[in-house]
Image (spheres, helix red, strand yellow):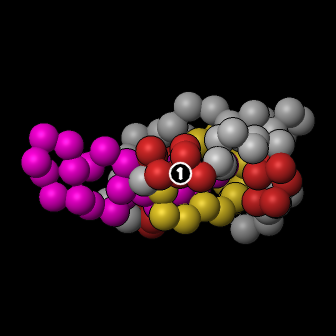
Amino acid sequence: MITLLTLSEVKSNNKKWFSVGNQIFSQDESYEVQDIKGKPYLIRSTYGFSDMFDRPKVLQWAANPIDPVTYEIGSVTDLFKTKRDLIRFLEEE
């Protein structure tokens, strides 16, 4: 897959989003930027709120669309059990 935006560019334009406090709050583990069908997305592995209400902590995958001009990070997609399931979902959109 061709990536037009880099993670460094997205991070430098969204400093609050990638702050240590926000990462701790959201329980994100990793980030990458991928273009899927010509649209850039922030792909995240996250534990984000999976352990609420005494449930076990589970790693999940999510994507946020990125505006290619302003680098603004949009609303999160649904959560998926695997990165492959997430990518498949984005490819079918």
From where the camera sits, is residue 15 visible?
yes
**Circle count:** 1
In terms of image quadrants, where is residue 39?
top right
Rendered location of residue 17, percent (x, y): 65, 41
Q: Is residue 16 above or below residue 11?
A: above
Q: Which residue is mark 1?
A: 23
From the viewer's perspective, tell me whether residue 36 is left or right of residue 87.
right
- Depth check: 22 or 92 in front? 22
Q: Is residue 29 above or below residue 86?
A: below
Q: Residue furthest front?
A: 21
**Quadrant containing the C terminus in the rendered view:** top right
- In percent of the image, x 59 and y 52: which residue is there? 20
Q: Nearer the viewer, residue 71 or 11?
A: 11
Relative horizontal placement of residue 3, taking residue 84 as reference (left or right): right
Crowding around mark 1 (Cα neighbors within 10 Å: few <14, some 14 to 19, many 20+) is some
Residue 6 place in picture, x, y as percent: 82, 60
Q: Which residues are magenta?
A: 41-63
Helix, strand or loop at mark 1: helix
Q: Is residue 87 magenta?
A: no
Q: Residue furthest right?
A: 69
Instruction: Name the amino acid type tagged 1.
Output: Gln
The residue lying furthest to the left in this view is 54
Left or right: residue 62 compared with residue 8: left
Residue at x-position 23% and y-position 59%: 57
Asked if residue 87 shows in the view, the reply is no
User: Where is residue 71 shown, x and y percent of the image?
Assistant: 81, 39
In the rendered image, which quarter contains the N terminus? bottom right
Is 61 covered by the magenta stretch? yes
Q: Residue at x 75, y 41 (%)?
A: 14
